[in-house]
Amino acid sequence: MASNDHPIRTLIQELRRLHRGPPGKERKMILYFYGMRNRGFSIGCQPGNVYERYDSETPEYHDIIAYTSELSDYDLYVYELDYLFKMEV
């Protein structure tokens, strides 16, 4: 797989396309991405207010979830999440 075809890179490009807005009125927001280490996305398995959920294409995580604000260290610990990256879209 070429480095430009990495699943997360593809996800970032799609998010930027979806959230760009019309020319001259581009919207800006920051999304924070987390990997679900020990369980998949389900009721009670992640903190509330999830912006979006994505299927993970790597064996390290069951799902990738995005939030519009950073999660606390407590949330990361309790829900067994890994901070992956943040991105302005």
Image (cartoon, grey):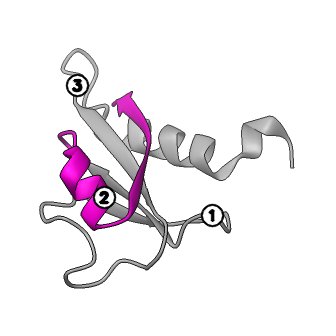
The answer to the question of whether label 1 and label 3 lie on touching residues, with beta carbons closer than 8 A, is no
Q: Circle 1 is placed at which residue position?
A: 60
> Label 2, label 3: how many angstroms apart (C-alpha)?
29 Å
Task: Say what secondary structure mark 1 lies in.
Answer: loop
Q: Circle 2 is placed at which residue position?
A: 77
Horizontal and vertical percent position of residue 41: 35, 77
> Label 1, label 3: how many angstroms apart (C-alpha)?
30 Å
Task: Say what secondary structure mark 2 lies in.
Answer: helix
**Given this view, does label 2 or label 1 mark the residue nearer the observer?**
2
**Residue in the image at 18% along x and 20% along y:** 25
Amino acid type at mark 3: Lys
> Label 2, label 1: how many angstroms apart (C-alpha)?
17 Å
In the rendered image, the quadrant that contains the C terminus is top left
Q: Circle 3 is placed at which residue position?
A: 28
Q: Nearer the viewer, residue 79 or 9?
A: 79
Amino acid type at mark 2: Tyr
Q: Is residue 27 left or right of residue 38?
A: left
Q: In this view, which residue lies farthest toward the top?
A: 24
Question: Pointer 1: residues within 10 angstroms few (<14), some, or many (20+)?
Answer: few
